[in-house]
Amino acid sequence: MLPKAATDMARTTYDSKEFRSHNKSDKPDNIVKKENDIYLECEAIQHELPNFLRPYFAYLKGNVLPMTRLAYLHDVRFFMNYLINETDITKAETPKQITSEELNSVVAADVNLFIDYCRKYMVEEGDTVTVYENNNKSLARKKSSVSVLFKQLYRDGIVDKNITDGFDPIRVAKPGEREIKALQDDEVMIMLDAVTNGTGLTNHERTYWEKTKLRDKAILVMFVTYGLRLSELQQLNLSSFNFSRGEFKIYRKRGKESIMPLNRSVEMVLNDYINSERKTVIPEDQAAEDALFLSIQGKRITERAIRDLVKKYTSIALNTSRRAGYSPHKLRATAATSLIGRGNSIYDVAALLDHEQVTTTQLYAQHKMNVKRDLVSDMEWELERTEDE
């Protein structure tokens, strides 16, 4: 096993001060740092909100995932700013100054108007006006954030009524109603051919491809083999891998550790990348020394960079524009549908993909490749008409 970066400190900044945490666990420093960054961002937002919301903060901290906690806090702060800037409910100038009496005067209709406002709104910054839009899925999350807030306020006796029953419903497509988008096996091969040989790339793209093709191929092969989440792949380290035992470790949601087996294809593309292309990149700092996938600048590759390269190569496979290429999550769906299509048990696939409910995996089992194409192939009305003439 390759050695872990020689540091037991994860560092970030908090209130303009350097924040250090001693990493005494066996988790890699980058994983600990990410957890700390989320924690500190949550704490910073809580400092901007009224003190009487502390029971709500405690509820979130103990009952939802860290990223969900952060999203809820962002939503609540946005709601407080909406009350300040768009209503007459409060005379406060900052969210911190909003009183419990003012929140007690909020009725369900006020929250419904807030959700409607979130559908499309403008933000002015200097000479720039940015228009933001939210789909129903995002609106449902904001409604959930505010609903949990007012339910907690009611339980704690801070508001007199539970107003959440009056919130308007938001129609969100159920999992079974959504079209599953995934590459077919032949499209996966086209994608891998593109990253291997540079086919379908522009001259500008080929300039970067020459420097990153082995890294990009390793990323794509790992996505379609294991169905990893974007964050799981981006956080991988050299020390995550034990090639002598043919396995590597990833960190799932809720801090779960999972040991994944290496197959020959993955081991081959990783060794190609690690033993040649990665050696030409000088890590920017000590934190990047253990990172598996590096940028040209020697930094740990960002999630955005991974999204961009996935969209690029999947767009070639789909013969569409770069903008219409698939996201990493759709490569996760590709892995699921391909594994099930090969006859693997949905329970085994659920375990590989870390699905908490097997019903999630069953959605991929119901997605039959080419089923629509096979159906309409027997309905060639015009061809049959012309053949009869």
Image: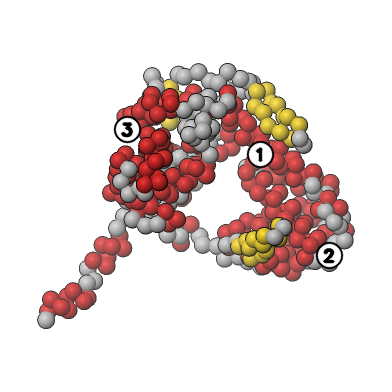
How was the colour assigned to the protein in this rendering? secondary structure
On the picture, is 255 further left or further right than 210?
Answer: right
Question: Mark 2 Cα within 10 Å, few/some/many (few <14, many 20+)?
Answer: some
Residue at mark 3 to residue at mark 2: CA–CA distance: 61 Å
- Can residue 96 be seen? yes
Callout 1: helix, strand or loop? helix
- Can residue 180 be seen? no
Q: Nearer the viewer, residue 329 or 133?
A: 133
Earlier-in-chain disc, 1 versus 3: 1
For residue 343, which numbered disc appears in the image?
Answer: none
Residue 79 point in image, percent of width and height? 74, 58
Q: Which residue is mark 2?
A: 89
On the picture, is 234 further left or further right than 379?
Answer: right
Q: Which residue is mark 3?
A: 265
Q: Hey, which quadrant is residue 197 in on the image?
A: top left
Instruction: Give the residue type at disc 3.
Output: Ser
Q: Looking at the image, is 348 positioned above or below residue 259?
A: below
Q: Which residue is mark 1?
A: 38
Tell me the quarter of the image containing the C terminus: bottom left
Q: Hey, which quadrant is residue 136 in on the image?
A: bottom right
Q: Looking at the image, is 389 positioned above or below residue 173?
A: below
Residue 150 point in image, percent of width and height? 76, 56
Q: Residue at x 79, y 43 (%)?
A: 47
Question: Mark 1 Cα within 10 Å, few/some/many (few <14, many 20+)?
Answer: some
Instruction: Give the residue type at disc 1.
Output: Ile
Callout 3: helix, strand or loop? helix
Earlier-in-chain disc, 3 versus 2: 2
Tell me the quarter of the image containing the N terminus: top left
Residue 225 point in image, percent of width and height? 37, 39
Count of numbered circles in the view: 3
Callout 2: helix, strand or loop? loop
Q: Residue at x 67, y 60 (%)?
A: 128
